[in-house]
Image (tube, helix red, strand yellow):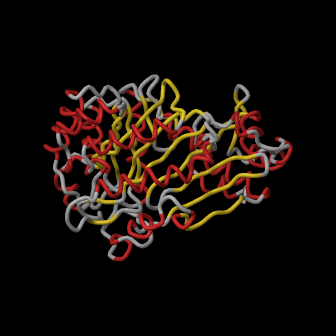
Amino acid sequence: MSVDPAVVPLALYLHFPWCVAKCPYCDFNSHGLRGAVPEDAYVDSLIRDLAFELEQAEMRPITSIFMGGGTPSLFSGRAIARVLEAFAAKLNFAPDIEITLEANPGTVDAANFRDYHAAGVNRLSIGVQSLDDAMLKRLGRIHGQGDVLRTVEIARNAGFDNLNLDLMYALPQQSEAEAEADLRAAIALAPEHLSYYQLTLEPNTEFAARPPTLPDDDSAWAMQLAGQALLADAGYAQYEVSAYAQAGRQCRHNRNYWQFGDYLGIGAGAHGKRSASDGIERRARHKLPRSYQAGAGTATAVQEQRTLETADLPFEFMMNALRLNEGFTAALFEARTGLPMSTIEPKLAKLAKRGLIEQVDGHTRPTSLGRAHLNTLVAEFL
């Protein structure tokens, strides 16, 4: 078997690498600003990089775009419009394309939000993290609760009817009651989507070097269970490990990742995945903005490129698909990996006996026990 790229959805990720300040828990490719955002020069780099990457697109429909960072909302509405216009002229945007832009409440301008919407952005993902001023201070955030409320109001007034709020729990010195109050405050803002996830200490971050006092594992687990119940009661269905949505409001772009779809990665540090009849390829751009911009439009912007080994494909697929509550079908596994389902059936049988996976309506999915031990479950496919 082989993969037919024509049946694999193709998305686009654009990375904007600058932030006002680097947060102590953040391990994303973000860089604190020293002076003004070089938006014209960086947009030029993105456009050059796309020209180099066009062959990868093969004029397949682009189902979604995600502009992440860093802080894309540091860029003006004019700059975002220029990016989208240039990319729309070269790519085949699907008629119902989902276009998401990440925004931080400390970098919000009402005119920019109106311009983002006019440019075609139809979904905002707002990095709230907490609505408790004391927690935000411990997290090193540059905004407060008032900024969050103002950002949501500005977004609604600008015409956005699809908002995601990022919210974390198990924050430094956070109690279970404080975590619940935080989540209730976020729900009260009535976003269409909530990303609710546990703060973890990632390598090469300030928090990893100087760890704050975090809730113990039992408290963090209690926060997770209470949060899941509260979100369900409020009409948010969990569809992925940390993703909850109102009906019809799941994030199409992230679902493409979790279903092992393809995506172009444009921008400093951006990653891409491309399926072809002769294998599945991954690419990564240079992380440092200066190095990336110097090479944009040529192969020198690519820091890493590799074709996945056939033996690694089951793990690569499961690492994504098993994050979804619904799991996956045999048809999806075969279409995305080019491997027959028989490749993994012995391991699936073993995991089913251990109570970690189950078969429901043609889907292979984690059980509640499997979701609680997802890393162990996925590691079986290494």
Residue 178 visible in the displayed image: no
- Establish if 233 lies above or below 242: above
Which residue: 39% across, 39% down? Answer: 84
Q: Position of residue 243 (x, y in %)?
A: 45, 39
Which residue: 33% across, 39% down? Answer: 81
Please tell me which residue lies in front, 13 or 316.
13
Looking at the figure, which quarter contains the N terminus?
top right
Q: How many numbered circles are shown?
A: 0
- Establish if 314 lies above or below 248: below
Which residue: 23% across, 57% down? Answer: 141
The residue at the far left in this view is: 146
Q: Position of residue 128 (x, y in %)?
A: 27, 46
Q: Is residue 225 left or right of residue 94?
A: left
Q: Position of residue 211 (x, y in %)?
A: 34, 72
Please tell me which residue lies in front, 175 or 193.
193
Q: Is residue 10 left or right of residue 275?
A: left
Which residue: 70% across, 32% down? Answer: 363
Looking at the figure, which quarter contains the C terminus?
bottom right
- Establish if 22 lies above or below 113: below
- Establish if 240 lies above or below 381: above
- Residue 281, quarter of picture: bottom right
- Residue 117, quarter of picture: top left
Q: Is residue 150 left or right of residue 94?
A: left
The residue at the far bottom in this view is: 209
Residue 141 visible in the displayed image: yes
Q: Position of residue 156 (x, y in %)?
A: 23, 28
Please tell me which residue lies in front, 304 or 217.
304
